[in-house]
């Protein structure tokens, strides 16, 4: 029998939002080791978020 294991991480980027997104991301990361959070001081755009995660 062949066993295949996949490892993954999920990144969430808070791009300077003013709602409670960062608190939610922090809680998700606390509850799950595969979840990571990155917080920007302001909105740098989609490209910056993608580059940061890759």
Image (spheres, rainbow, N blue to C red):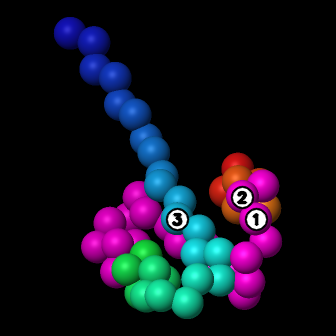
Q: How far apart in space, not on screen, are marks 1 and 2 (Cα)?
A: 4 Å
**Rendering coords of residue 32 (x, y %):** 32, 66
Q: Which mark is residue 45?
A: 1
Circle 2 sits in a helix, a strand or a loop, which is it? Answer: helix
Q: In the rendered image, which residue does mark 2 sit on?
A: 46
Q: Position of residue 7 (x, y in %)?
A: 43, 41
Judge depth for marks 3 and 1 and give the one in front: 1
Residue 45 covered by magenta stretch: yes
Q: Contact, CB < 8 Å: mark 1 with mark 2?
A: yes
Q: Is residue 52 visible?
A: no
x 52%, y 65%: residue: 12
N-terminal-most mark, 3 or 1: 3
Which residue corresponds to mark 3?
12
Q: How many marks?
A: 3
Front residue of 36 and 46? 46
Identified at 47% across, 55% down, the residue is 10
């Amino acid at each position: 029998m062949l066993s295949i294991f996949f490892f993954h991480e999920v990144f969430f980027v808070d791009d300077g939002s003013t709602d409670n997104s960062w608190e939610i991301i922090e809680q998700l990361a606390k509850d799950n080791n595969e979840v990571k959070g990155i917080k920007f001081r302001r909105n740098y755009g989609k490209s910056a978020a993608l580059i940061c995660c890759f």
